[in-house]
């Protein structure tokens, strides 16, 4: 038997002898490990509950949204979706975004593809027109596989844009709807008409 094996054998036998002489040691170790694991789980649950409370309490006034940079506006829309239960909501806007700035799955299993158009002047800014909607319409379902395709603005839409959206089953969130949503009154899917039916019968908690 090699020296290393002998040493290992001696150590094992020593530990076994110590445990036999002190049978309470394994019990204490198990209790300590179990206690540490329980404390970790409690901490995780507290953090999750706090995050839920924090996100559900999220509110924006229109003046706050108007003052944002367009990228911050996308982040605000993402956070509002998270507040309403879309845990996977992500901001994806940028170069090569193919018309999507925010993507999220709601508690009913529907994938939301959202394009954001920020107007620093709010209603006084230029209306969102059909070209932006045409881009979104060309990618929202074919590329991103969205169930609900939405354009959100803190401004307004042109009349041709409203007509185009109706004809293509696109959902529009103008300044008035955004004000209701951002105030925390109801989730976005309760504020829009003709939203596709849920993919699952009951929402995930």
Image: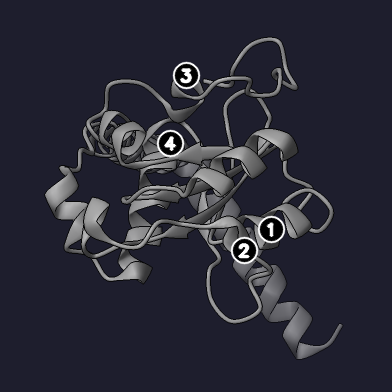
The residue labelled by disc 2 is 131
Residue 34's tag is 4
User: Would you say residue 88 is visible in this rendering?
Assistant: no
- Look at the numbered discs 2 and 1 and tell me whether their residues touch, using CB distance below 8 Å: yes
Estimate how packed mark 1 is, as few (under 14), some (14 to 19) or many (20 or more) residues with alpha carbons within 10 Å.
some
The residue labelled by disc 1 is 134
202 displayed left or right of 24:
right
Q: Residue at x 59, y 82 (%)?
A: 95
Q: Spatial distance from mark 3 to mark 4, Cα to Cα?
A: 44 Å
The residue labelled by disc 3 is 190
Q: Nearer the viewer, residue 16 or 86?
A: 86
Q: Nearer the viewer, residue 194 or 14?
A: 194
Q: Nearer the viewer, residue 13 or 81?
A: 81
Q: Mark 3 or mark 2, which has the lower sequence index?
A: 2
Q: Spatial distance from mark 2 to mark 1, Cα to Cα?
A: 5 Å
Image quarter of residue 124 = bottom left
Quadrant (top left/top right/bottom left/bottom right) for the N terminus: bottom right
Residue 13's tag is none
Q: Spatial distance from mark 3 to mark 2, Cα to Cα?
A: 27 Å
């Amino acid at each position: 038997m090699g020296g290393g094996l002998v040493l290992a054998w001696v150590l094992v036998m020593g530990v076994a002898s110590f445990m036999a002489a002190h049978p309470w040691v394994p019990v204490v170790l198990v209790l300590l490990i179990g206690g540490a694991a329980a404390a970790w789980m409690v901490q995780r649950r507290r953090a999750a509950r706090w995050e839920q409370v924090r996100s559900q309490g999220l509110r924006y006034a229109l003046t706050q949204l108007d003052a944002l940079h367009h990228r911050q506006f996308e982040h605000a829309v993402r956070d509002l979706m998270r507040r309403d239960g879309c845990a996977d909501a992500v901001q994806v806007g940028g170069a090569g975004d193919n018309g999507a700035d925010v993507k999220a799955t709601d508690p009913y299993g529907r994938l939301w593809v959202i394009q954001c158009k920020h107007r620093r002047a709010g209603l006084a800014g230029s209306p969102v027109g059909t070209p932006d909607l045409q881009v979104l319409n060309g990618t929202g379902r074919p590329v991103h596989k969205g169930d609900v395709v939405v354009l959100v603005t803190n401004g307004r839409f042109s009349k041709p844009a409203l007509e185009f959206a109706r004809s293509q089953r696109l959902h529009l969130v103008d300044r008035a709807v955004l004000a209701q949503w951002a105030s925390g009154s109801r989730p976005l899917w309760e504020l829009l008409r003709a939203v596709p039916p849920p993919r699952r019968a009951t929402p995930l908690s």
